[in-house]
Amino acid sequence: MLSCMHEHDGPLTRLRRGHEQAVLELLRKHGPLSRAELGARSGLSRTTLHDIVGGLVGSGSVVAGTPHVEVRRRGRPVEKLSLNPAAGEAVGIDFARRAVHVAAVNFAHEVLGSASESHGAELSWPARVDIAARLLATLTAGAPVAPATEAGRRDGSDGSDPVRLDALSAIGVGVVGPITDPGSVDARAQGIDGLPELLRERFGVPVLLDNNTRLAALAEAVWGAAADSGDVLYLRLSHGVGGGLVVGGALHRGPGGLSGEFGHITVDPAGRRCGCGGTGCLETRASLDAVLRRYREAGGRADDLAGFLDAAAAGEPAALDVLERVGHDIGGVLAAVCQAVGPGVVVVGGELAEAGPALLEPVVLALRRRLMPLARRHVDVRRATLGEAGSALGGIALVLHESPLLSHYPRPVSEENA
Amino acid sequence: MLSCMHEHDGPLTRLRRGHEQAVLELLRKHGPLSRAELGARSGLSRTTLHDIVGGLVGSGSVVAGTPHVEVRRRGRPVEKLSLNPAAGEAVGIDFARRAVHVAAVNFAHEVLGSASESHGAELSWPARVDIAARLLATLTAGAPVAPATEAGRRDGSDGSDPVRLDALSAIGVGVVGPITDPGSVDARAQGIDGLPELLRERFGVPVLLDNNTRLAALAEAVWGAAADSGDVLYLRLSHGVGGGLVVGGALHRGPGGLSGEFGHITVDPAGRRCGCGGTGCLETRASLDAVLRRYREAGGRADDLAGFLDAAAAGEPAALDVLERVGHDIGGVLAAVCQAVGPGVVVVGGELAEAGPALLEPVVLALRRRLMPLARRHVDVRRATLGEAGSALGGIALVLHESPLLSHYPRPVSEENA
């Protein structure tokens, strides 16, 4: 599902990545295989296989071992290659505005768990990375992670450290704001300058960054509400309004990392000024602040989200009326996007989605009314299922998606592990 | 650029396609290669290469021959494999509402030419296929197409037929309306029932169909105004308003084949009824009919497009005012799409684009005003360059894109060629 290759690479790079991906897929599917078996199943020549497997072993993704059960006729043990379950463990971190969320999986793609901690808005990057490391330690303690063979141990660790962060293959990280190349000057403008280096130093593995809302979209498409669909439009209704697109099974970033900005599609050209610098964007109508403002203007008395959601759940007309009008605005924007990218599964997440059908029903109504009739039967609106761990899980999906690239990444050795 | 594989295939099918693509790319890049050279460059084992090359030779995509210039030390000639220039010739046909457009390329991806013929709206499919065959005959007569070796001749043709349609590898065909699976019941509903079979009988090669506006988008991204970009939003302003999206270098079809329907994004929920069944769609404001209506309402006197364009070119205020208002509507819709998929290259085609800057400048103005400021510098609006041949060229791009699939297609033998 996530195997779409990078279009800007040369054919030979793509070829190599394809070979790596094929080898990893075969080992994931069939378990340990000998080089001869890998050769037969992959169709690669001995020379190429030697090269590809060498790279994967060198990066710690694959380990070689000799099981006792199988020997050749002449008595010499057959070396089997397998995925390194320790190396395969992947971790996702979401640095939200006021909280850190983490999640972890093993190489079998089983989610080991997730954890969260809130913090003040102005906390420094080193302090937020500390929180992430602490949460990960609680998460991976006691996790069923052990090297399959001696070759799986890549350093002198005595095994007493329950975190085993030295065994990670990579970390996928979500941050606020558009992300294209975290190494570029844009990183400074976006306030994430230094974060990738900080994470690499702390964990000693490659770091992949993306916008955290986009990662939540990817996670919903891989593990969540839209796990059955390759075309997903994810909308997050929170302090900001954002989203992400999964197109043909692959996360779509867009030029400049600026895709999925559904919150800044104009709803009313004569409307309020938006934080983005535009006017009358959906975010000025459907962010948590905007919804509470509309609710108070309608005579509602609750002054926080919990109170508003309670009022809606109790059937208070003012609250339901606001949700209906917000849903109408949202449905109109979703319709425009569905007309453009094709109707598919629409996943609505974020705190406001907790209003449930009182919000989603007006959304569906407005969406269908604005879609061309031919398209209406193809659209399917669902509530997100992954909650606040979504973006951290998306970080993991990013790592698993990009894993064939890892052998091409520099692998800086952290001072802690050296 | 167009190598994104099909996500719904199993890993082994993808692997095989990757191998075929690699072999074809190597032959395209390096010219004739021996099996040993192909093995060394592709990294494939002898067994796999034998299998892959066998399939490609069997389908006529690749031919084997023995050039005189190169012999082994022992005197035995080395067989070289090369692309079959005859088989590689690809043809595109666009069945528009009232015209047939065709285009042809050779295997070097050089466009041999294009041709068009208008017809009445109610013409039958057999008659339209006749027009296509006649146009293709004029086009490929005298084309530099000859088999490189004897092995390139796949039948008893005496070579006097200038069309050489028996040498085609496939035909890419554009039709009006959303296309997902032309073999499905939808084909009947869309009025193209029987067309694929008719074309296969006539030309004896596989037929790939898609929406013709979407094919024009692909062509602009491959050969036209956006040949430098992998993310293209193409808008066609004609009797209808439609478009297509190229995302990460690949044509995006969308679930139900319903992507790129920019003409049916709502501009005014209280507006006119649209042919799609919706209300206030962009098409009700920006189709040729709508523009002429708005022009007459503004006091304009011309009653056809040519007269309107002349008036605009002469600087008539009513015509310029209408173009400004139409451009404003278009820019607003484009902004919504750019916010969703990310700003990239926007290509505007269709007859109305002939108005040039008088239309495009207001489009750009409205588009930038509605985009979030961060995204404005990434957007780039251009006029389409391929004209009415665009969709037929897109049919060719579709064939070249999908060509590694061809060895898996059934190859029905036409009765004409048998």
Image (tube, coloured by chain):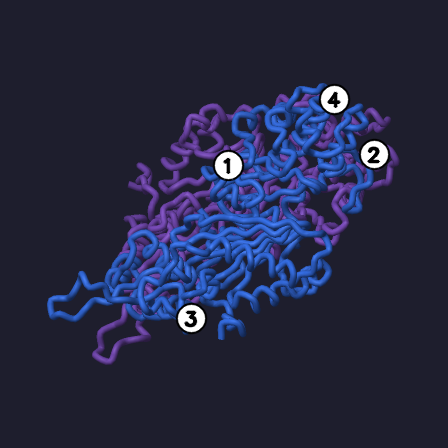
Chain colours: A purple, B blue
Q: Earlier in the sequence, mark 1 or mark 4?
A: 1
Position of residue A4 in the picture relative to residue A336 (left or right): left
Front one among B203 and A365? B203
Mark 4 crowd level (few <14, some 14–19, many ≥20, 10 Å Cα): many
Q: Estimate the x, y position of residue A409 in percent, counting from the top left.
A: 34, 43
Residue occupying the far bottom of the picture: A73
* Residue bearing the label numbered 1: B225
Measured Cα–Cα span from mark 3 to mark 1: 40 Å
- Specify whether disc 4 shares its chain with disc 3: yes
Helix, strand or loop under label 1? loop
Q: Earlier in the sequence, mark 2 or mark 3?
A: 3
Q: Are marks 4 and 3 in contact (CB under 8 Å)?
A: no
Badge nearest the viewer, 1 or 4: 4
Is B158 located above or below residue A83 in the figure?
Answer: below
Q: Is residue A183 visible?
A: yes
Alpha carbon distance from label 2 to label 1: 35 Å
The amino acid beneath tag 3 is: Ser
Q: Residue flagged by tag 4: what amino acid is it? A: Ala
Mark 1 residue type: Ala
Q: Residue furthest front?
A: B160
Residue underneath mark 3: B157
Q: Residue furthest right?
A: A317
Mark 4–mark 3 Cα distance, whole angstroms, equals: 61 Å
Distance CA(mark 4)–CA(mark 2): 24 Å
Element under label 4? Answer: helix
Give whichever of B388, A373 is nearer the camera: B388
Q: Are marks 2 and 3 in contact (CB under 8 Å)?
A: no
- Front label number (3 vs 1): 3
Question: Which numbered disc flags the more N-terminal residue, 2 or 1?
Answer: 1
- Left or right: A133 in relation to B383: left
Q: Residue beneath label 4, please? A: B318
Q: Can marks 1 and 4 be said to lie on one chain? A: yes
